[in-house]
Image (cartoon, rainbow, N blue to C red):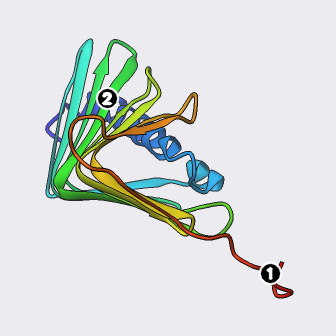
Amino acid sequence: MNLPRALKPQAATLVLAALALLASATALGKSSDRNQPMTIDSGASECSQGGNMQCVFTGNVEIVQGSLRINAARAEIIQRGEQIEQVILTGKQATMQQDMDDGSTMNARADRIVYEPKKELLTLTGNYQVESPRGSNSGQRMVYNMASGQMQSGGDGTRVRTVIQPRAQNKEGS
């Protein structure tokens, strides 16, 4: 990071806090992942200090925390005062993969993924797709409200595709 040595720990704390929040945004994800160390690899990083802090990671950004794996061309973390305002992942496409507590895997991808912790919103835009063993949802824009569990997609003149998988049958056929 292009920061004075004394400021590096503060910036690192900001980055880890923001990305830990992003990890918790995938409410379906493995709950133990939040307690794992996070690794961020990128071609370059730059952080600004002050009341409004911004950290930008570019160049094949790879974020790993437990079973959570994020790949993006660019990751940007914006903080206003003491609060993380946004985490923005972009690329063609930004991808997220995470194991769920039941052992299955959730995959998501979009041209842009925005997490707003204060509003508790996760927004996927640009050819998004979310897949799990339960089914899939794809379209141009999806907003997931983590507080209410409500997911909204479409309504902007574009089509949304939802595929719901049948319930698994037990061995006795019931």
Residue 145 position within the rendered picture, expressed as x and y whole percent measured from the top left: 48, 32
Residue 77 position within the rendered picture, expressed as x and y whole percent measured from the top left: 27, 34
Total residue callouts: 2
* Residue found at x 31% / y 29%: 86
3D distance between C-alphas at marks 1 and 2: 43 Å
Task: Indicate the amino acid at tag 1.
Answer: Asn
Residue extending farthest to the bottom is 171
Residue 26 position within the rendered picture, expressed as x and y whole percent measured from the top left: 50, 47
Residue toward you, 74 or 95: 95
Residue toward you, 129 or 166: 166
Tell me which numbered mark, 1 or 2, is placed earlier along the sequence: 2
**Which residue position holds label 2?**
86
Is 118 above or below relative to 93? above
* Residue found at x 30% / y 35%: 155
Instruction: Locate residue 78 relative to residue 30 in the image: left or right.
Output: left
**Which residue position holds label 1?**
170
Instruction: Locate residue 22 relative to residue 41 in the image: left or right.
Output: right
Residue 98 visible here: no
- Figure quadrant of residue 89: top left
* Residue found at x 57% / y 36%: 149
Task: Indicate the amino acid at tag 2.
Answer: Gln
In the image, which is nearer the foreground, mark 1 or mark 2? 1
